[in-house]
Image (spheres, helix red, strand yellow):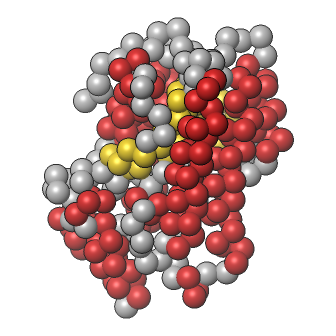
Amino acid sequence: MQATFDFTGRRVFVFGGTSGINLGIARAFAQAGASVAVASRLQDKVDAAVAELSELGPSAAGYALDVRDAEAVAAALAKHQDGAPPLDVLVSGAAGNFPAFANDMSPNGFKSVVDIDLLGTFNVLRAAFPHLAKPGASVINISAPQAFVAMPMQSHVCAAKAGVDMLTRTLALEWGAAGVRINSISPGPIADTEGFRRLIPTEKIAEQARRSVPLNRFGAAEEIGNAALFLSSDAAAYISGVVLPVDGGWSVAGAGAAALAMSQHAAR
């Protein structure tokens, strides 16, 4: 169930917002009355997301780009903001992942994830800063439990997301004087997403993972959307520099154990 927040008249841009958790966030803002823009690499996904969001909220726009390309990110933001009011909310959620042991991973594979997750986040935030409503803007980075829970087969993601969280904290210091708040959301296992299917590929692993969540269930994308609505609302006006787990207690109780079981299964 979507939480009740009113974002009528506000402008939101969600990078990575055409699928999974990030599309869930874009939907939440559209349903709350915001004008929403999304960006991701594939034009067909951008078109589909824009069509859906246009039905949910007052307006939607989309851009096909790769967050690793700083110039493309800056150009999309400049085009979207040309003559328009500043952005009230920016969400940086583009991410890459594939399960692999460090010894089996190529340097390019490791670099690819770091470039998408960490460098991509930097590119988005750096390019967006001139377009943010100051003071009052809310910036949200999408992190992961791998930022603070070591997981086998996830060394690239662990490194990248730890960097994202430290970038969040650092920019909370640097941007605070301008009145811009920046926080991270760390989603737990969210059903019906590409990341879920890659990391939890079988019913047996799914059951092990579910039992490791204290609330005894997987999350839904709309629950991450609710967290984003809260962090961007006036109710969170004094919250900045926070990494917020939205994971049913998974990171507290058993994320590492569940990941170990998953990796052992994959190794067989």
Closer to us: 31 or 6: 6
Q: Position of residue 161 (x, y in %)?
A: 53, 58
Q: Is residue 162 above or below residue 226?
A: below
Give me the residue at 68% from left, 46% from top.
122
Residue 45 image-quadrant placement: top right
Residue 60 image-quadrant placement: top right
Closer to us: 19 or 151: 151
Q: Left or right of 21: which side holds 106? A: right
Asked if residue 23 shows in the view, the reply is no
Give me the residue at 33% from left, 71% from top.
256
Q: Where is the C terminus found, in terms of image quarters?
A: bottom left
Q: Position of residue 169 (x, y in %)?
A: 54, 45
Q: Position of residue 202 (x, y in %)?
A: 31, 71
Q: Left or right of 174: which side holds 101? A: left
Q: Is residue 4 above or below residue 250?
A: above
Q: Left or right of 256: which side holds 98? A: right
- Residue found at the very far bottom of the displayed protein: 268
Please tell me how many numbered marks the rendered image carries: 0
Q: Is residue 45 above or below residue 132?
A: below
Closer to us: 241 or 156: 241
Q: Position of residue 159 (x, y in %)?
A: 56, 66
